[in-house]
Amino acid sequence: MFSSMTKTISKEIPLAEITLRRYEKPSKLSERDIVRKLCLSIGLLQPGDSRDVIVDILHVLLNAKKQKKALTSEEIEKEVINTRKKQKLALQGIASSNIRRQIKRLRDLFLVEKVKNQYRITEFEELNVIFEEKIEKFYLKSIVDRVKEYFESLR
């Protein structure tokens, strides 16, 4: 039985959020491991998470970027499955719906864009440039500016 005195706490939904983590310098790692650390560093993957299909999605798109090639979600899915099989990784998280959801997470961070129903690394640009221009100067700055407003409002 529920009491009418039970307090309801409203959920605060952030307008934007980003997770940043610092790891050791990327040396003596395979390309996939570097992509994995990048995903961990920007919050696309949680530490200890074994469901890391987002790593392979980003890796597939980075390889396609080298040829200036955009891919459909079906092509990404096929490449991810091939990659995971070659590396003897569990075929977890490879459902079409999950592939599309993970691509959306990459799009939300401006790393990937959709052009005519195909996906590519944004403007086939280098990731460090995308990070600096889209995330650091725009997205992160807007979050930091708003946090400063909260600090200033408590003076």
Image (cartoon, grey):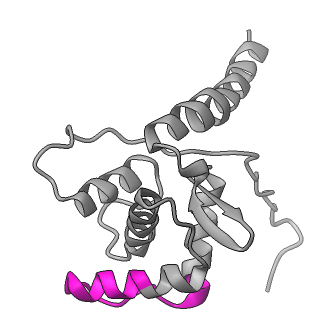
Q: Closer to the camera, 71 or 41?
A: 71
- Residue at position x 46%, y 43% in the image: 126
* Magenta stretch holds residue 82: yes
Question: Where 69 falls versus 143 (above or below)?
Answer: below
The span shown in magenta is 79-98
Picture quarter with the N terminus: bottom right
Which residue occupies 30% across, 83% down? 84
Q: Quadrant of residue 143?
A: top right
Number of dots carrying numbers: 0
Residue located farthest toward the front when viewing the structure as drawn = 67
Residue occupying the far left of the picture: 28
- Using the rendered view, name the quadrant where residue 151 is placed: top right
Give the image location of residue 51, x and y in percent: 38, 77
Q: Quadrant of the C terminus?
A: top right
The residue at the point 70 percent across, 23 percent down is: 145
Q: Furthest-right residue in view?
A: 4
x and y percent of residue 98 in the render? 56, 82
Q: Nearer the viewer, residue 115 or 107?
A: 115
Is 39 left, or right, of 144 in this rendering? left
